Image (spheres, rainbow, N blue to C red):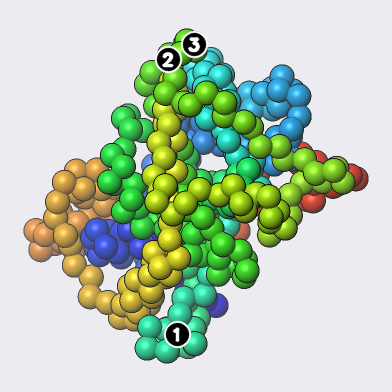
Amino acid sequence: MDYRITPDDRAMFKRCRRQWDFASPRRRGLEPANSLGSTSLPTAFKEALAVYYYPGTWDWQHQLKQSLVHKALQRSLENTDAADELAKATRLIDRYDEWAVTVDDFAPVKIDHDVSALVRDPADPEQGLLTPDGAGVTYTCRVDLLAVDAADEYWVVCHRIVDDWSPVEELLFDEEMTAACWAWEQDYIGMEIAGTIHNEVRLGAAPEVSAGESSVAVGVTPVAQHEASGGGRSIPQHVRLSARETRPGADDRVQRRTAGLVCRTRIRRGRDEIVASGGLLALEAVEMAGAPATYPSPGRHCLSCEFAAPCLAMFEGTDPGPVLAAGFRRRPDESEQKPRLGQATWGFGRGAAPPSW
């Protein structure tokens, strides 16, 4: 069985190895026992966005498509106690829709898609990296949205629920998104990813649409999903010569547009940048998949760490076993998780079976 590295594993390993040792599925794989799996508003909103950008319904009548988005919210929040949570979420997704149409200059191709890439051996890039026991090492991530623009360029999109817009400098150094570009190109040989799009949403404010208030340039043209055959876009698709000629230059690296509660930051990633992200991941994977030393890295992140109690016990020199036994459990395997939209889809041509909404 392959040794799989996820973005969460990688982030925890670099932030605090003790947290990684507690939580990683390849280590102890623990989670709080009182985790009931209830869906929060941000999580429900992201699940609704998956339906909103579902490729098979992108060109459907707006009212019909929006009703499916509302149903997705209802399913996500059906176990919540707050009676007004659904009404609030519905108002927010409608506000998002009113603003998003002013910045959506792409068509969705895949949503919530799992990507897996073989990690190369830094000492021999022609070979895959192996663990000491001979297992292959892969990097797996979930891409919120793969989109194609009017110039037939592909973009990896992530949805983020934030309190305030992230600085552009922070997004430029987003190694998880850059690694997703690299992984997609490894999984779909022959495809080139133009860059990343950060789709940030502020749920704390839901302004009404006001003409002239948006900072979006006038004339944003939606990109259709349909083809003349009646099916969706293929992966990869033929790049039209006319579209290639309209592509912007390399100097136009960052483009940011805001519209109400939506901030859309598009960052063009160069070939060297994407390739280098795979090389950096390989160097980290050598240590992760080997026999790394585990130690704490105290910092502000400790205040929100779910493993603060057993970690504090270890700092005090006592056995964390009783704390772990009383308050934590083994995380469920992926095979035990419920099916989700985007996990496995039918084709979008005529006669294809629709998802069971």
The residue to which callout 2 is attached is: 213
Measuring 43% from the left and 61% from the top, which residue is drawn there? 270
Residue 293 percent coordinates (x, y): 23, 75
* Label 3, label 2: how far apart the Cα atoms are: 6 Å
Q: Quadrant of residue 200?
A: top left
The residue to which callout 3 is attached is: 211
The residue to which callout 1 is attached is: 125
Nearest the camera: 64 or 103?
Answer: 103
Q: Amino acid at mark 1?
A: Pro
- Of callouts 1 and 3, which one flags the residue occurring earlier in the amino acid sequence? 1
Dot 3 falls on a residue whose secondary structure is: loop
Q: Amino acid at mark 3?
A: Ala
* Label 1, label 2: how far apart the Cα atoms are: 51 Å
Q: Amino acid at mark 2?
A: Glu
Quadrant where the N terminus lies?
Answer: bottom right
Judge the density around disc 1: few (<14), some (14-19), many (≥20) Cα neighbours within 10 Å.
Answer: few
Q: Determine contact: label 1, label 3, CB under 8 Å.
A: no
Measuring 17% from the left and 62% from the top, which residue is drawn there? 296
Res. 308 visible in picture:
yes
Residue found farthest to the left: 316
Judge the density around disc 3: few (<14), some (14-19), many (≥20) Cα neighbours within 10 Å.
Answer: few
Quadrant where the C terminus lies?
Answer: top right
Dot 1 falls on a residue whose secondary structure is: strand
Please state if 294 lies on the left or on the right of 316 as rendered.
Answer: right
Measuring 9% from the left and 58% from the top, which residue is drawn there? 316
- Of callouts 1 and 2, which one flags the residue occurring earlier in the amino acid sequence? 1
Q: Determine contact: label 3, label 2, CB under 8 Å.
A: yes
Residue 89 percent coordinates (x, y): 51, 21
